[in-house]
């Protein structure tokens, strides 16, 4: 029977079979055992420092009669009830599934010896948290590796499953009634939907980088379908059932509708304290993290913008202590002064130096920033005034692009700072453009940094020593490992603005209709650019780039060259005279 969302039939495809060796699934084995102090899953893994009860493949009933499966790890040798941290995952629990830190060079800078092997992908490690008096519940989402039903991609349905799971966990005999959520990526994204359902036993949440709007933030950002990564993601789900096919859905329904609106988390409904993590080192999560932080309606919320990569950040000792301070305060009532923590902490990327230390601010967006317009000018420069005479430059929009930072047909405009300068927040490009060869075109823009000699720089997301290399050239050119710059994307026919969602510092496009452009006609495009937190020394340069292809590095090597746009032929950018093409950038004073 087809499931409907907003009156639309949801399309499905068969997930990968449980028999696939990559699933690492040996059948269901409901059981309870005690892992003794010193237990190691393998000689390479971290040992448990305290005896731990492992309840395996427990049944968690959902409101529609299907059952999910979970592993619960909790302290042994105690009769005291403990709070629980829920890990909600579609990738497999407790070491199941295809994905692990090993998908990235150097295990994302986290040695295998620091992980127990019982952690779910992108999740807190039971060996870390059980000694501190917490239970960890690793749950396989609906339709995943023994959990019944057809897998859901975000939305209210996944939120309801999470609600039912929290209420089940919070009433178990070993639980003190307090449940938190924690994790990266999907494990964070799901939290926006679950917390919006307001389960009574949910006490606090740690969404450690997660998108919040499938259509607007990733799958069809700017109206441009981004199918390669989402197709890859679909190859990581293992089930006897079908999975929701969002790639087929975007092909059938490329415009905003009730189905896609269901996949936008409603953070304004969140009532519990939240520790929100964000970074620039992702092509998926930055906007979701900052948007939802802004939309949470209470003041028991904290935002930390870090300068590494989310998996690496999750397991660093100083961050583990920070997470625990938050959890201890709300889950255990420990009076540790957590609420005096600055509401916003951010680093500034310096690219050719390590990131700055954290700088505290009172709120987000940071009220101290001032927006400045940098106008496209002659000689590929940016200036504080638009030229008096109209000029134009052009590029081919349909050249093949490999996303390895050496693609052709990219315009670059530069500005040299005469003093130390910081950028902090979202930017916006306003461009007057035309395409003489087609009635629509996709535009990609980017802010990045160059050194005093004009050499474009890359920011290494994970310290070289943690990756086990000594030179930047030894680090693969993929998004998890290197950040190039903050980006914006827009399909010209999607240029209409949604005023109901837009904010003074961030515009949302409507996406409910296409407005094609007669070939050669000039149109005004407003393109929002994701958060940048950059620091420039005097003499260093800001680069503003424009192209007809994605200038971000590919997420993984097999995805290089796979992102096809709708472009045909040449695109022309007009500036000066009546066409004040510019980029508006938030600058903040340097102490």
Image (cartoon, rainbow, N blue to C red):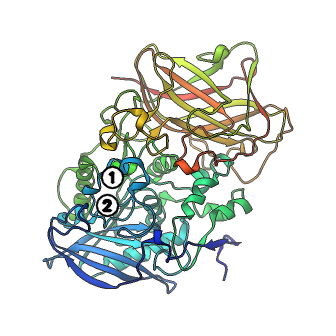
Locate residue 566, reporting x and y percent. 74, 45
Q: In the drawing, does residue 387 fall left or right of residue 330?
A: right
- Image: 400 above or below 539: below
The answer to whether any part of residue 302 appears in the image is: no
- State how far apart marks 2 and 1 are (Cα): 7 Å
Locate residue 177, reporting x and y percent. 28, 74
Locate residue 354, reporting x and y percent. 34, 31
Instruction: Read off the residue under disc 2.
Output: 124
Residue 87 versus residue 407: which sits nearer the camera?
407
Instruction: Read off the residue under disc 1.
Output: 314
Total tally of numbered discs in the picture: 2
- Image: 105 above or below 123: above
Mark 1 is surrounded, within 10 Å at the Cα level, by few (under 14), some (14 to 19) or many (20 or more) other residues, namely many
Quarter of the N terminus within the rendering: bottom right
Q: In the drawing, does residue 63 fall left or right of residue 577?
A: left
The answer to whether any part of residue 141 appears in the image is: yes
What residue lies at 55% left-to-right and 66% top-to-bottom?
153
Q: In the drawing, does residue 405 fall left or right of residue 537?
A: right
Residue 199 versus residue 310: which sits nearer the camera?
310
């Amino acid at each position: 029977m087809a499931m409907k969302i907003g009156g639309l039939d949801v399309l499905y495809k068969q997930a990968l079979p449980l028999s696939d060796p990559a699933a690492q699934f040996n059948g269901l084995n409901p059981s309870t055992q005690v892992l003794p102090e010193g237990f190691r899953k393998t000689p390479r893994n971290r040992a448990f420092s305290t005896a731990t009860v492992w309840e395996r493949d427990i049944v968690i009933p959902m409101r529609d009669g299907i059952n999910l499966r979970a592993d619960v790890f909790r302290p042994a040798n105690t009769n005291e009830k403990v709070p629980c941290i829920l890990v909600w995952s579609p990738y497999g629990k407790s070491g199941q599934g295809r994905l692990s830190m090993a998908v990235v060079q150097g295990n994302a800078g986290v040695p295998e010896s620091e992980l127990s092997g019982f952690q779910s992908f992108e999740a807190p490690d039971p060996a870390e948290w059980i000694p501190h008096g917490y239970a960890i519940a690793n749950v396989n989402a609906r339709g995943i590796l023994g959990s019944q039903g057809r897998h859901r991609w975000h939305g209210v349905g996944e939120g309801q499953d999470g609600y039912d799971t929290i209420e089940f966990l919070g009433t178990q005999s070993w639980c003190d009634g307090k449940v938190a959520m924690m994790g990266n990526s999907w494990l964070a994204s799901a939290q926006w939907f679950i917390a919006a359902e307001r389960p009574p036993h949910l006490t606090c949440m740690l969404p450690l980088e997660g998108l919040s709007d499938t259509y607007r933030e990733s799958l069809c950002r700017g109206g441009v379908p981004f199918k390669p990564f989402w197709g890859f993601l679909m190859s990581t789900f293992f089930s006897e059932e079908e999975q929701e096919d969002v790639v087929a859905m975007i092909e059938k329904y490329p415009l905003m509708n009730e189905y896609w609106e269901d996949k936008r988390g409603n953070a304004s409904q969140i009532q519990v304290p939240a520790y929100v993590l964000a970074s620039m080192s992702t092509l998926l999560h930055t906007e979701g993290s900052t948007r939802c932080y802004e939309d949470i309606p209470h003041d028991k919320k904290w935002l930390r913008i870090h300068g590494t990569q989310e998996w690496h950040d999750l397991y660093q000792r100083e961050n583990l202590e920070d997470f625990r301070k938050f959890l201890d305060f709300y889950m255990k009532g420990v009076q540790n002064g957590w609420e005096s923590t600055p509401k916003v902490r951010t680093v500034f990327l310096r690219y050719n130096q390590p990131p700055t230390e954290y700088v505290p601010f009172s709120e987000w967006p940071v009220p101290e920033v001032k927006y400045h317009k940098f106008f496209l000018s002659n000689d590929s420069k940016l200036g504080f005034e638009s030229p008096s005479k109209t000029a134009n430059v052009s590029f081919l929009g349909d050249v093949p692009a490999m996303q390895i930072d050496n693609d052709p047909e990219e315009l670059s405009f530069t500005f040299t700072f005469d003093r130390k300068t910081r950028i902090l927040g979202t930017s916006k490009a306003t461009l007057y453009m035309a395409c003489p060869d087609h009635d629509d075109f996709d535009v990609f823009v980017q802010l990045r940094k160059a050194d005093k000699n004009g050499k474009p720089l890359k920011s290494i997301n994970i310290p070289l020593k943690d990756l086990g290399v000594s030179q930047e050239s030894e680090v693969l050119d993929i998004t998890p490992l290197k950040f190039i710059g903050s980006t914006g994307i827009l399909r010209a026919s999607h240029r209409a603005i949604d005023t109901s969602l837009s904010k003074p510092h961030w515009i949302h496009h409507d996406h409910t209709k296409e407005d094609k452009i007669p070939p050669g006609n000039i149109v005004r495009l407003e393109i929002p650019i994701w958060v940048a937190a950059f620091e420039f020394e005097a003499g260093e340069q800001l680069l503003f780039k424009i192209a007809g292809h994605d200038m971000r590095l590919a997420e993984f090597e097999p995805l290089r060259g796979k992102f096809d746009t709708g472009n045909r032929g040449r695109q022309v950018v007009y500036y000066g005279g009546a066409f004040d093409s510019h980029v508006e950038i938030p600058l903040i004073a340097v102490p």
